[in-house]
């Protein structure tokens, strides 16, 4: 009965479904609630099997053990019950289908060895064969014992002497026939006698064979050296399991048992979020588990077709540098003109674990395909699982490739497989973690710049990306205008999926996104100079990890640090509560929360310092993870007095989503600018909900007096279309306006001039659709919350705001804000920043000098001459009493300076 539970699990039936089937067949008392059967009987079996397989030598062969135990059960049952009753039970209780299968089981219940024919060396029906056998044996023409090759190719017969005896007698019979055929001029009577002896012997042997179990029949088949080696490897891999697969909900079940909009198992979500992949494989006990993600209704239709019998699907296999890639092709809907939905599963055969997983897949011949759906802003929803049978030719090729890989990686020391897998890649763990972040944090829009390639798959990817951005911009405009759901929503989903599929194909073509990431040559490594460190912050099962890359003597070095005392789950709740507070709340809740949250960030800041400062790192590049991307990590304290912060420990502290994007921006061909500075300013007041503010126009006047070459587009002229037309001509772009976030991050942006919110907003999606900023060295988004977001999706970990769109379209760096800023803070920041820029400072030098000015309250001592004299004079011209007001605002929020951050290449 327990193997019955395990075989139902292979068919992806849920624990509740399995328990209902057990109750319906009478295997458990019908009065016991199904939930109790599922909890106390089904789940303990599934946990055991998921960890180590079924309890016999071939732990991966659930069907084989089940068939053997059913045959043994039927034999025992027949000893006390009539055959017809047992036949009915095999159908009703054990659900065997077809009379042929039932007949085979009933035949196998009798003792087969009662039909064992005599050895022809000693006895035959009429004596002719016995005499003919003894004659060549005495003259050395036939051997009494089995040749060594017979037993060496059937190693599992060593424990079955009765089967070995069957094989020996069969060998004598065959050897005699072959010997007689070599002798000439035998008498007809002798040949007739031999034929009668052979026919009688064969009839008995046929009866014996029909009563053998399926497992016993398999033992007679000779094994090749590769097959024997493969089984040895699989046995050595017994009991290997992953801790993340231990929870009861770690695997999905049949779609009809998955609740609508139910969440995805944590380990699947973690793989998609942290590794940025869409298709991957695992092994859960005897189950090879494949995962595929879908977005569009068209692809969901393909999934539904797949899950409705008769299923129709295809497989393809291809080699790549160091492994094998299996392509699973979903069924194509007759009305869908698009190519069939294909999912790649890559096994890198430079890894023992992957080679063993591929061998296991080829041996069992099926995969448990789990499907999850991406909805909204990257949320994951479970769809369900289905068993996929692999074609024989696919299994044969996979087995050949995996065995060859294991011979190369392990050799004859197969007993060390478990140990090798346990320690495999430990020296590369930090490198692997870093690259998986590169994939995850670049998969949304930044790969368009970072994956530039000569591969033919690149142009379709770019075309799909731009088309998606255009559709998103139209959708965002309608959302802002309150038009509700769009008729083109299906088209938008299809475009999102087309871009992602094109990205997967491009990654496959450029050897990225392999099952186990690793760089095969230095050209794939991140470009980090010898005085820099790039730090990916990772949310790994609720605990913060830091993956650090630095360069020494031309070689990349990686570190992986786990901040055990820094749980992200409670921090995420606190950040969420903080973002819901209003900054002007009379009880200062917002400011107090901010100070406490920034203080908490001292833990990872200190870990970063301890890791990189021994290596003379001067520039720090941070790529945060949720919820840390909403906080000013550069302001994290390094001492109890909070006088020293992370920004003080380095010459530069900047943000960037990936090192690949930084490298792409650095190596991109830059265009010459026509104008030094373009200011786009709009004070609002022309649309409901956008109050009139004076800061943007003040900023425009201040900036104009601090540069020699300034172009200003403001008020009615400052439309999104006009701004996008002018921006590619400038080296520095300064935008001063209302900044607005939105639950749909593609609708977030800055409010310019227009007859409706949809026409007035310069959104992230508009920038992605039409922006070209190869001449722009710096974009200053001096508006509220231009460096933050409202999204809750987990699949994109960093930079969901408008700053990200500017970077993706070629801008070198962006200055943005993490929370609401006042008009005065915006004007002062702009004045000081542009005073330094106008004097020739680079982006980061100007930014850091401005932060230092604000943080150290340098406005208390009026500057008469120099850069600060020019900046303060420009502010005086528009706001005479600005120092007193800034004092008041700084007292309310001492961290007001930390709202400004810089992202990109400086």
Image: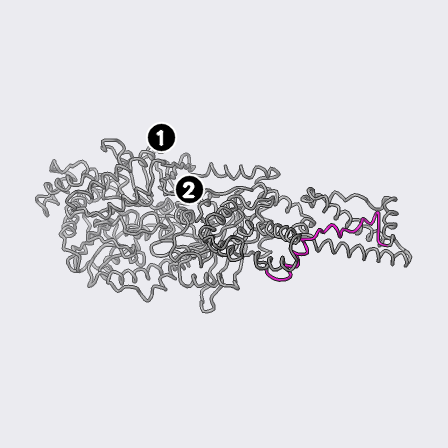
Judging by the rendered image, the residue that carries numbered circle 1 is 614
Residue 81 percent across, percent down from the top left:
64, 55
Q: Is residue 87 magenta?
A: no
Q: Nearer the viewer, mark 2 or mark 1?
A: 2
Q: Nearer the viewer, residue 413 or 17?
A: 17
Q: Is residue 258 left or right of residue 176?
A: left
Magenta part of the chain: 97-125
Dot 2 falls on a residue whose secondary structure is: helix
- Give neighbour class at mark 1: few <14, some 14-19, many 20+ (Cα, 10 Å): few
Q: Earlier in the sequence, mark 2 or mark 1?
A: 2
Q: Is residue 512 visible?
A: no
Q: Quadrant of the C terminus?
A: top left
- Tell which residue pokes out farthest to the left in this image: 880
Q: Position of residue 365 (x, y in %)?
A: 57, 53
Q: In the rendered image, which residue does mark 2 sit on?
A: 433
User: Distance between the Cα atoms at labels 2 and 1?
Assistant: 22 Å
In the rendered image, residue 340, in percent from the top left (x then y), is placed at 47, 62
Using residue 814 as the reference point, say whether residue 293 is left or right of it. Answer: right
- 708 w.r.t. 329: above or below: above
Q: Farthest residue in the bottom direction?
A: 335
Along the line of sight, the residue nearer the viewer: 661 or 726:
661
Residue occupying image coordinates x 26% and y 61%:
477
The image quarter in which residue 636 lies: top left
Is residue 316 something one can see in this rendering?
A: yes
Crowding at label 2, few (<14), some or many (≥20) Cα neighbours within 10 Å?
Answer: many
Q: Is residue 809 left or right of residue 406?
A: left
Q: Is residue 177 left or right of residue 487?
A: right
Q: Secondary structure at mark 1?
A: helix
Residue placed most toward the observer, 553 or 365 = 365
646 versus 814 height, above or below: above
Q: As rendered, which of 706 and 140 lies closer to the eye?
A: 140
* Residue 114 lies in the magenta stretch: yes
């Amino acid at each position: 009965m327990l193997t019955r539970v395990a075989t139902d699990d292979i068919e992806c039936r849920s624990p509740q479904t399995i328990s209902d089937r057990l109750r319906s067949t009478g295997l458990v008392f019908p009065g016991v609630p199904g939930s109790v059967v599922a909890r106390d009987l089904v789940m303990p079996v599934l946990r055991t099997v998921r960890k180590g397989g079924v309890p016999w030598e071939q732990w991966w062969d659930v069907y084989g053990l089940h068939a053997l135990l059913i045959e043994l059960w039927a034999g025992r049952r027949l000893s006390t019950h009539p055959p017809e009753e047992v036949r009915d039970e095999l159908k009703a209780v054990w659900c065997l289908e077809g009379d042929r299968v039932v007949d085979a089981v009933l035949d196998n219940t009798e003792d087969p060895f009662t039909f064992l024919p005599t050895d022809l060396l000693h006895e035959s029906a009429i004596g002719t064969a016995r005499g003919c056998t003894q004659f060549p044996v005495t003259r050395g023409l036939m051997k009494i014992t089995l040749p060594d090759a017979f037993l060496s190719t059937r190693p599992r017969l060593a424990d079955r002497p009765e089967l070995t005896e069957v094989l020996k007698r069969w060998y004598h019979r065959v050897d005699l026939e072959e010997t007689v055929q070599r002798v000439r001029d035998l008498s007809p009577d002798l040949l007739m006698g031999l034929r009668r002896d052979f026919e009688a012997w064969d009839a008995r042997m046929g009866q014996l064979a029909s009563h053998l179990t399926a497992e016993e029949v398999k033992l007679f088949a000779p094994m090749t050296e590769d097959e024997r080696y493969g089984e040895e490897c699989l046995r050595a891999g017994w009991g290997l399991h992953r801790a993340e697969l231990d929870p009861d909900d770690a695997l999905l079940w049949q779609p009809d048992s998955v609740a609508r909009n139910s969440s995805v198992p944590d380990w699947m979500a973690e793989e998609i979020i942290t590794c940025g992949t869409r298709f991957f494989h695992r092994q859960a006990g005897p189950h090879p588990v494949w995962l595929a993600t879908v977005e569009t209704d068209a692809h969901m239709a393909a999934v539904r077709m797949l899950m409705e019998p008769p299923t129709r699907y295809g497989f393809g296999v291809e080699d790549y540098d160091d492994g094998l890639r299996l392509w699973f092709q979903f069924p194509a809907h007759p009305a869908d003109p698009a190519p069939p939905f294909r999912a790649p599963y890559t096994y890198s055969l430079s890894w023992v674990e992957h080679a063993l997983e591929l061998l296991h897949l080829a041996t069992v011949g099926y995969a448990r395909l789990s499907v999850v759906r991406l909805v909204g802003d990257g949320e994951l929803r479970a769809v369900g699982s289905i068993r996929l049978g692999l074609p024989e030719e696919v299994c044969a090729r996979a087995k050949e490739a995996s065995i060859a890989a294991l011979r190369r990686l392990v050799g004859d020391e197969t007993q060390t497989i478990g140990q090798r897998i346990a320690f495999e890649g430990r020296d590369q763990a930090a490198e692997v973690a870093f690259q998986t972040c590169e994939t995850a944090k670049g998969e949304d829009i930044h790969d368009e710049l970072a994956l530039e390639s000569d591969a033919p798959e690149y142009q379709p990817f770019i075309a799909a990306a731009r088309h998606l951005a255009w559709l998103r911009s139209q959708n965002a405009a309608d959302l802002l205008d309150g038009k509700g759901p769009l008729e083109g929503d299906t088209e938008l989903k299809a475009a999102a999926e087309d871009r992602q599929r094109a990205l997967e194909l491009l990654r496959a073509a450029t050897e990225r996104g392999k099952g186990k990431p690793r760089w095969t040559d230095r050209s794939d490594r991140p470009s980090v100079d010898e005085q820099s460190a790039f730090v990916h912050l990772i949310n790994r099962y609720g605990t913060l990890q830091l993956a650090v890359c630095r360069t020494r003597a031309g070689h990349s070095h990686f570190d992986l640090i786990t901040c055990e005392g820094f749980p992200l789950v409670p921090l995420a709740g606190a950040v969420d509560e903080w973002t819901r507070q209003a900054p002007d709340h009379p009880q200062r809740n917002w400011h107090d929360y901010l100070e406490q949250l920034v203080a908490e960030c001292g833990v990872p800041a200190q870990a970063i310092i301890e890791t990189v400062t021994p290596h003379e790192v001067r520039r720090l590049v941070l790529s945060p993870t949720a919820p840390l991307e909403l906080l000013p990590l550069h302001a994290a304290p390094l001492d109890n007095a909070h006088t020293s912060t992370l920004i003080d420990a380095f010459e530069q502290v900047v943000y960037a989503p990936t090192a690949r994007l930084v490298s792409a921006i650095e190596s991109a061909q830059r265009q010459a600018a026509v104008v030094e500075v373009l200011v786009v300013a709009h004070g609002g007041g022309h649309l409901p909900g956008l109050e009139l503010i004076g800061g943007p126009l003040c900023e425009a006047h201040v900036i104009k007096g601090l540069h020699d070459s300034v172009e200003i587009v403001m008020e009615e002229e400052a439309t999104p279309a006009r701004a996008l037309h002018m921006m590619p001509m400038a080296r520095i772009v300064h935008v001063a306006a209302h900044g607005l976030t939105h639950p749909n991050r593609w609708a977030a942006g800055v409010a310019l001039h227009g007859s409706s919110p949809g026409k007035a907003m310069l959104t992230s999606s508009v920038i992605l659709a039409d922006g070209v900023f190869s001449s722009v060295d710096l974009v200053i988004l001096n508006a509220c919350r231009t460096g933050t977001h409202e999204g809750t999706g987990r699949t994109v970990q960093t930079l969901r705001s408008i700053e990200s769109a500017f970077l993706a379209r070629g801008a070198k760096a962006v200055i943005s804000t993490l929370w609401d800023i006042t008009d005065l803070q915006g004007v002062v920041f702009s004045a000081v920043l542009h005073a330094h820029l106008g004097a020739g400072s680079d982006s980061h030098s100007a930014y850091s000098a401005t932060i230092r000015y604000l943080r150290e309250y340098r406005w208390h001592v009026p500057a008469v001459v120099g850069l600060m004299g020019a900046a303060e004079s420009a502010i005086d011209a528009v706001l005479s009493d600005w120092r007193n007001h800034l004092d008041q605002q700084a007292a309310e929020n001492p961290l007001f300076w930390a709202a400004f951050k810089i992202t990109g290449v400086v």
